Image (cartoon, rainbow, N blue to C red):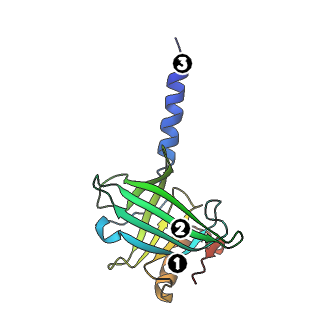
Amino acid sequence: MNLKFPFIAIIMISLFISCTGIPKNAIAVKNFEVEKYMGRWYEIARFDFRFERNLDNTTAEYTLNENQTVGVLNQGHDYIKDTWKSAKGIAKFIGPKDEGRLKVSFFRPFYASYNIIALDKDYKYALVVGKNKKYMWILSRTKTIPDDVKNNYLDLAKKLDLDIDKLVWVNHD
C-alpha cells in the first residue's frame, strides 16, 4: 500500500490550516461590510518582512470581484533601488462574510491570513494582523492617521503581545 499520498495530503492540509490562523486573543471585527472596505488604503506602519523591505509610499487597493472575491493590488516605492514594485493578489473570506477574516494569495495556491482586528465605523482606519505575531499593518484612507487612533491601535497591539517597537513607520511623500 502506498502511504505517500495520505502523508502528503496531511502535510498540505496542515499547511493550509496554519496559514489562515489568527493570533491568540485577537478577534476579527464583526458586522464587517466588504463593500465599505474597498478602495485605496495607505500603509501607515507595518512589521518589516521581505516582500515590503525598503518600501515607502506603500498602498493597497481592494476591488470586489463579481465572484465575491477581493482583488488586491499592493504597491510601493523601493527607496534603495529607486523603483516601484507592485503585486496583484486575490483575497477570499475564511468564514462568514460579515467577519473581517480573509486569506490572501499573491502566489496561488498559497494563502496567508488577513485579519482585520480594529476598524472605525467610517472605514477610515484599520488594524490588520496575519496568522501570528510576525505580521501587522496599520492602514488609513489618508497618508496620515490621527494620534488618538494610532495610540488606540498601538495599545491593542500591545495587549495582544505584538512587539510595536519593531514597527516600520512608512514615509509617504
Q: Nearer the viewer, residue 39 or 129?
A: 39
Number of the label disc, if any, that sits on residue 75: 2
Name the amino acid, label 1. Asp
Neighbours of disc 1 within 10 Å: few (<14), some (14-19), many (20+): some
Is residue 32 something one can see in this rendering? no
Q: Residue at x 64, y 62 (%)?
A: 49
Q: CA distance from mark 2 to mark 3?
A: 44 Å
Which structural element holds mark 3? loop
The residue indicated by pointer 3 is 3
Q: Quadrant of the C terminus?
A: bottom right
Q: Residue at x 47, y 55 (%)?
A: 113
Nearest-to-viewer mark from 2 and 1: 2
Q: Residue at x 50, y 65 (%)?
A: 74
Q: CA distance from mark 2 to mark 1?
A: 28 Å
Q: Can you give x and y, in whole percent of width and height, for residue 89 in the image?
A: 46, 55
Given the current orientation, which residue lies at the most extreme top position?
Answer: 1
